[in-house]
Amino acid sequence: MNKPVSLVKDGKLAIPSPDVLGFDPHELHRKYHFERDRRLRPDGASQYQDVEGDLDHYKDDPYIAERIERVPVQETIEVAILGGGFGGMLMAARLQEAGIRDFRIIERAGDFGGTWYWNRYPGAQCDVESYIYLPLLDETGYMPKEKYSFGPEIYAHAQRIGRHYDLYSRAYFQTQVRDLRWDDADARWIVTSDRGDVFRARQVVISSGSLNRPKLPGLPGLRNFKGHTFHTSRWDYAYTGGSYAGGKLDKLGDKRVGIIGTGATGIQCIPHLGNAAGHLYVFQRTPSSVDERRNSPTNPEWFKTLTPGWQRDRNDNFTKLLVGVAVEEDLVNDGWTELFKSLGQLLDGSGAADLTDAELKQLGEILDFQHDNRIRARVDATIKDPATAEAAKHWYRPWCKRPTFNDEYLPTFNRPNVTLVDTGGLGVERVTEKGVVVDGVEYELDCLIFATGFEVSRATYTHQAELEIIGRNGVKLGDYWARGMRTYHGLMSHGFPNCYHMGFTQTGYTPNFTYMLDNQSRHLAAVFSDVKARGVKALEPTKQAEEEWLALVTAPNAMTDYLANCTPGYYNAEGNATSNNDGFLQGHYPEGGLRFYEMLAEWRVKGDYAGLVVR
Ligand code: NDP
């Protein structure tokens, strides 16, 4: 239990005794480390197996009605955009606004939507507020139905953007780019696809997604399972019944269903499986932290009051709060802002600005404990069986794994047809023809679903995107980045002129990815329009600029220590980070997202392309 006690007095740290505090911070610290240590494994990220060869079917697209037949095209264009998710669409929209219409979007899927095209599992929902997460609401005038939209609405919004900006006429779907080759004489990229297309593009923007390639655990016997199986990012409604639009998964009534994985995806789809399956076994290695969802319908009267620019202002407000900049009002006011506000408010109100770094670290840990104790108390209050409740509690700090928000997940374990199989941090032992073995016990299954996430490794960027990028002098990006990403501004790389990577790593971090992608799109659209006006053929970072950027973004920071103490997961390279250029949450602009976008704007205004060789 937490008691509302002051942790700072007269500008000094004053941690009360456990009796007054309601818990013992040293005890919890030890517990967190114990839980982390028993999950650490020497094979780290290589515990997962690649979804290719005879496992390739886990990547098949179950959503395309029919294969598009078309002749290969040969086109010379200004910009090739790889990826038709929100990143690629924002890039296209911002290019159009900047007067550049000569672009193509090339996308492997059958439509726009990216992650929302693939992840159509039941219960899929955005966990950042829809008013800031769904892009281009201001421009399209669309009002999300709820504070947190469900997947079908978000997917439909992607199509709305496609129509609004006339992107369908400039998109090639069901097309996978295989090769990007820099033609130095012509200062263009030669982009070739699996359809035999050849695009000669001045600029290439890659927005292939950071969590796009499904991964499977490297379990012995996985190939032997004789029942039905699929990954959550390729949901098989033909087998489960129901549909993405809704409805019960009515074909599962007589089935024994197993699901491996209790991350953000598992949390959202497990209630639907529990509601439908004859019996559901949830195989858990590490529990998620599951806070309240607090969803609500959008008030149309409020929406009518919004004036142009509102979405950007709201996003700025959210991002400011998350980087500790004071705001007059918390517009989003949800679980995310709550997580960030606690430390900020405490410091503001108590004159604790003089605390040392070590004291701030200690204070931060105690505030996290208080936050997580509340979430663990919620588990006890919801799950009736005490042993199941105990197993469902997470023992790590909030940023070790994606925090989740859901009101149906925990009650699912009160159903008589649902069993939580806790693997004690060790994971599933093996798969047999009939099912799954945990701690020597075989659980027979008709269907095994993998909610085991996506490949994340800096070194395998081109592997994830399933393409090769061959830059100046024939250097492959896969080789150049073999020991981690090397970029300037997180966007471009030495030896690879006019090739831009949209995404997360080595840029300024903000938890709302669409806002991050929008800022990058605006920046690149401004750069492309400027180089066009100036007749510049190629921009490429100097080796020195790249080295300096790398040193800046990989310098140890507060997050380095935080993640090193985390339970394993993809945020910290499964606890095996060998450098600060490893792991999903490492390698970021130290001053945060907002300052990063400001810095890019200042860089553009100066107009000298600092750090770049201009041709
Ligand atoms: P994650 O990588 O987060 O989770 C994978 C799950 O599989 C973990 O629970 C992991 O356990 C478990 N697992 C892996 N191997 C084994 C094994 N051998 N035995 C038992 N369990 C195993 O993938 P998700 O698809 O859940 O989420 C990926 C990301 O996608 C999220 O972090 C989030 O960024 C995004 N997302 C966002 C959503 C949103 O609301 N906006 C919704 C869904 C996803 P362990 O933790 O021990 O490794």
Image (cartoon, rainbow, N blue to C red):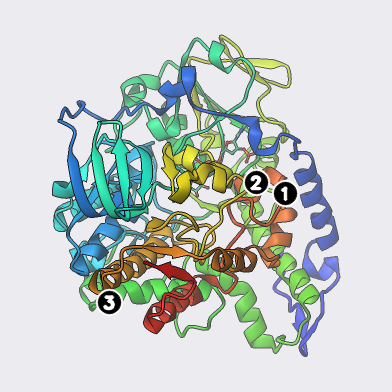
Image quarter of residue 564: bottom right
- Residue 51 visible: yes
Name the element at disc 2.
helix
Precedes in sequence: disc 3 or disc 2: 3
Residue located at (54% from left, 14% from top): 223
Instruction: Identify the mark nearer the N-term, 1 or 2.
Output: 2
- Proximity of marks 1 and 2: CB atoms separated by less than 8 Å: yes
The local crowd at label 1, few if under 14, some if 14 to 19, many if 20 or more residues have their Cα within 10 Å, is: few
363 relative position to 326: left or right: right
Q: Residue at x 29, y 53 (%)?
A: 186
- Taking 52 as reference, is 603 above or below it? below
Q: Which residue is mark 2?
A: 573
Disc 1 on helix, strand or loop?
loop
Q: Residues within 10 Å of mark 2 (few under 14, many from 20)?
A: many
**Circles 3, 2 touching at the beta carbon (< 8 Å):** no
Asked if marks 3 and 1 touch (Cβ < 8 Å), the reply is no
Establish whether ligand 1 lies closer than 8 Å to the Cβ of label 1: no
Q: Amino acid at mark 3?
A: Gly
Query: In the rendering, which numbered label is found on residue 309?
Result: 3
Image coords of residue 346 (percent x, y): 65, 80
Q: Nearer the viewer, mark 3 or mark 2?
A: 2
Image location of residue 350, percent across then percent down: 69, 87
Name the amino acid type tagged 1: Thr
Q: Which residue in the protein does label 1 denote?
A: 578
The residues bearing labels 3 and 2 have C-alpha atoms spaced at a distance of 38 Å
Which kind of residue does numbered mark 2 sit on? Ala
For the N terminus, the quadrant is bottom right
In the picture shown, does residue 91 fall above or below 315? Answer: above
